[in-house]
């Protein structure tokens, strides 16, 4: 059973009397309307306020799911499923539908049922979505997906590097960058994500480390800024 080393909060799915109780531990379980195997999670969190509370909730659910996936040998498959789910909920219309309080829980679960079959999600991932719907935490799904990636990277000793360039880089260049990041960090694995930013003019940047705290800037934009700073002049722009 997945557990977190924090003050525990507990939920009993589909129970009108479910409460946020930081001093008692129960079981979070939901078999849902999908006729799928029962999923049991032990979710623990700290009582906090505002955005920090939201972050704590997302992290708790994400870590519980990651622990469960690791324990049943489906960590890689679950990570892929969460990426698929995150892509779905990144669509504004889908996200608004699931957080709409006027839409019934049954309707939301029926839609999850349909999507589960279409996307071929694992049963425990589908049930996890049902738990979030039932507990009115589905609005946290994108934050949970992000926190799950953090947990996955820790479990697999993976360093995430975000490479931003003006135009897409080819696989050979990305592989070379991955090797460089691996050498810098000593990570067992390196995962590359890419982004496009035309304001860089040319070249690329690499963000890695905890929360993207470290930056390697190989862009022409950066070089122009450094030249401008050295010469104590305003912004320098290339004229084509």
Image (tube, rainbow, N blue to C red):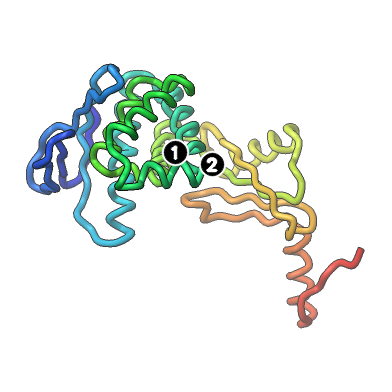
Q: Which residue is mark 1?
A: 149
> Looking at this view, is 65 or 30 the one in front?
30
Q: Which residue is mark 2?
A: 160
> Looking at this view, is 212 or 81 the one in front?
81
Residue 65, x across and y down, in percent: 32, 32
Q: Is residue 197 left or right of residue 207?
A: right
How much space separates mark 1 and mark 2, taking CA atoms?
9 Å
Instruction: Say the numbered circle drawn on residue 221.
Output: none
* Quadrant of the image containing the N terminus: top left
The residue depicted at 24 percent of the width and 37 percent of the height is: 134
* Quadrant in the rendering for residue 30: top left
Q: Is residue 153 left or right of residue 180?
A: left
The residue depicted at 47 percent of the width and 50 percent of the height is: 210
Label whose residue precedes the other's in the sequence (1 or 2)? 1
Residue 205, x across and y down, in percent: 67, 52
* Quadrant in the rendering for residue 222: bottom right
Residue 49, x across and y down, in percent: 25, 61
The residue depicted at 53 percent of the width and 39 percent of the height is: 186
């Amino acid at each position: 059973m997945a557990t977190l080393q924090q003050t525990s909060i507990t939920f009993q799915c589909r129970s009108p009397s479910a409460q946020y109780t930081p001093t008692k531990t129960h079981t979070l379980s939901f078999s849902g309307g999908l006729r799928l195997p029962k999923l049991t999670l032990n979710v623990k969190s700290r009582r906090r306020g505002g955005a920090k509370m939201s972050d704590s909730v997302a992290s708790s659910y994400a870590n519980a799911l990651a622990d469960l996936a690791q324990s049943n040998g489906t960590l890689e498959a679950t990570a892929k499923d969460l990426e698929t789910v995150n892509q779905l909920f990144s669509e504004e219309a889908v996200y608004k539908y699931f957080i709409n309080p006027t839409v019934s829980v049954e309707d939301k679960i029926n839609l999850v049922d349909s999507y589960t079959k279409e996307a071929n999600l694992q049963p425990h991932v589908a049930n996890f979505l049902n738990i979030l719907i039932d507990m009115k935490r589905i609005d946290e799904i994108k934050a949970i997906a992000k926190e799950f990636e953090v947990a996955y990277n820790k479990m697999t000793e993976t360093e995430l590097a975000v490479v931003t360039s003006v135009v897409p880089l080819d696989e050979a260049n990305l592989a070379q960058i991955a090797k460089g990041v691996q050498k810098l960090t000593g990570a067992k694995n390196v995962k590359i994500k890419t982004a496009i930013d035309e304001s860089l003019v040319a070249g690329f940047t690499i963000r890695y480390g905890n929360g993207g705290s470290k930056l390697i800037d190989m862009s022409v934009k950066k070089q122009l800024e450094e030249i401008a700073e050295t010469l104590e002049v305003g912004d320098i722009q290339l004229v084509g």
